[in-house]
Image (tube, helix red, strand yellow):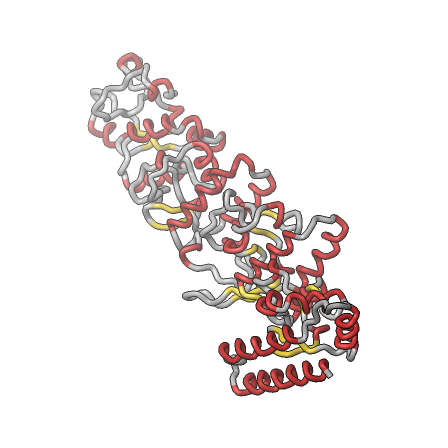
Amino acid sequence: MSRIAYETELATVKRLYEAAVKKSVNGADPELDKWLLNRCLHAMKFFTFRPSTPSPEVSNILSLAFYGASPQFSIYSSAGVRNASDVRVMNPEMKGFIKEIPTLPEEIQTGASEMVAVLQNKHMIRQITLEDVMKELKWRCLEEAEMVQCIKWRASLPRQPNFDQQFRQQFLSAAVFRIPAEGDKAERIIPLSTIRTYVNPGGLVPVDGAFPSHSLPFSLSRQFGQNVLTELFGWSVLNIQEWVAFLTSPPPGEYLAPEHDPTASPLFAEKLLMVLAKGWPNTSKANQDDIVQRLSGVTCAPTQQGLKLPADAYLPGAHIFPDLPVIQFSSNTPIKGQLEKVLTSLGVRKHVDLQLVFTRMIKTGDWTVPQLVKYLTSVRDILSQEEMKRLQQTAAFFREVPAGSDQATASSMKGKRWKLKDLYEPTDAMRDLGLPVLEWTDVQRWKPGSEEGMQSP
């Protein structure tokens, strides 16, 4: 009779709960839910059997009859009245992400702990199992904060190599979470099975940048160490080469905001180059080659004229024509060391191509011979053999008109250009010998011992 009375009371609570749920898309009213829970809690306390006196056998017989009357035992859960076999005792470490599985409310666990203990001893109600967790993950898409709690729970389990390897695939295949839309960023649904990398807070890749879809959002990865993300899930730290590959060739459907596009934002292009300079010594040759191949073909070199292809830009030391694009950083970072090495590896020029110099000198006449010689002296150490050969073969220099020459001779020599190898230093000794000398119109006299003199033919 006591079991009938208990089940009748729980059946009434169930009808009231289900009626309330049908009336509202948001579930039962919180106040009603609390009232029904307390009503069920009262019934559970009322039918809790305690040791009888003088003989405890009486209470034992009544308890056995009460729980043995039927294998179906009703109890109040987070989803209303359910059969106890369908309800789980909540694990505090799972509270942050288990929502769909019916669980015992905390008020029931503490307020009717004696009955709950009996149900557990009789295996009529159980703790949440791994199978239950997998069902929860397959049933619904977790929110971002819930996924954090889910990973924390997974990390709290004892490490067992064989189990970890086997459970990893099941866990990653089932878990899905959502990043809500924010500003112009659309909502993202992210299955953990698509994740391969994560951003290391202390690594080279900036945490405030854009990342490929196979990288775990930093809002999650920052809360875990490598021992969790790498050892448990097999993910690796997002390296520079992978980051550059994404920035230069985003997969179809993946959005790259202008402020994170090195071909659209000079500030971000500068940040990218600084990151490359910092990590260049520790980047493998293969990854360096891949980065160069990707960046050399896009406009990622910040100059005073905007973003240019690296091969179309020049280092500040090569600034000999005012209209040439020269590398310019908003941070005024000096270009030297690894930064210079990265820029030149991408194709940024240390000096202006000699053919361009000769062409402009000949066509525009903007440059004098002394200016040209001084420039050649400054870049002599970085000229290639091909450029040195071109220098020897190019008629770009004027010959000084010998003193006493008649007007016809002077006129015929004026404007004619000579190869450097056919001219001599503009010194009195060479003039006295009647040799063709280099025209030198600089305000400063030619000094044989100067750098220009040391490089003369």
- Tell me what residue is drawn at x 59 percent, y 52 percent: 197
Q: In which quadrant will I find the N terminus?
A: bottom right
- Tell me what residue is drawn at x 50 percent, y 46 percent: 201
State the residue in front, 438 or 13.
Answer: 13
On screen, residue 441 versus residue 133, left or right, reads: left
- Tell me what residue is drawn at x 64 percent, y 83 percent: 9
* Residue 58: % across, % down: 77, 72
On screen, residue 87 versus residue 417, left or right, reads: right
Q: From what the image shows, is residue 455 above or below residue 119?
A: above
Q: From what the image shows, is residue 177 above or below residue 422?
A: below
* Residue 166: % across, % down: 75, 55
Q: Is residue 358 visible?
A: no
* Residue 147: % across, % down: 57, 61
Q: In which quadrant will I find the C terminus?
A: top left
Q: Is residue 330 visible?
A: yes
* Residue 353: % across, % down: 41, 38
Q: In the figure, residue 109 lies in which quadrant?
A: bottom right
